[in-house]
Amino acid sequence: MRPSPGGDAAPVLILGILAFGFIVGWLAQLVLGLGTKPDGRTLVAGLVGSLVGGLVGSLLAGDGLALKPSGLIGSFVGAIIVLAIWSRVSPAPSRR
């Protein structure tokens, strides 16, 4: 059997999504002034915010599900909203 021309891109895609979510969450953390050291909340807020904000932003702009600036901006705004709500509901434990 010959491998498919595209190869197995699923692991690379998953790593790319995680990296993007982490970066977007970290930027949202910086904007909100919650510190500069990323943690688990940063990753989760970035992923959830990217999913919700990016999807809503792309669909409202009429771009569909294509990778466009509206989705990237929506991802960032969504991460800020998710992290802001999360930090109000459940503040991070203080680090010593």
Image (cartoon, rainbow, N blue to C red):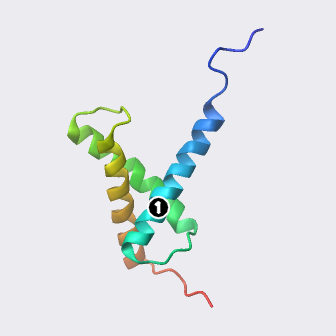
Q: What residue sits 41% from the left and 48% below the top?
A: 51
Residue at image position (29%, 40%) is 58
Say whether residue 3 is left or right of residue 46: right
Q: Which residue is mark 1?
A: 25
Judged left or right of residue 6, residue 70 is left
The quadrant the C terminus occupies is bottom right
Kind of residue at disc 1: Gly
In the orientation shown, which residue stands out farthest toward the bottom? 96
Numbered disc total = 1
Residue 94, image x, y percentages: 55, 87
- Relative to 50, residue 61 above or below: above
24 w.r.t. 85: above or below: above
Q: Position of residue 8 (x, y in %)?
A: 66, 26
Drawn side of residue 20 relative to residue 80, left or right: right
Q: Is residue 76 left or right of residue 3?
A: left
SS category of the residue bearing label 1: helix
Looking at the rendered image, the quarter that the N terminus falls into is: top right
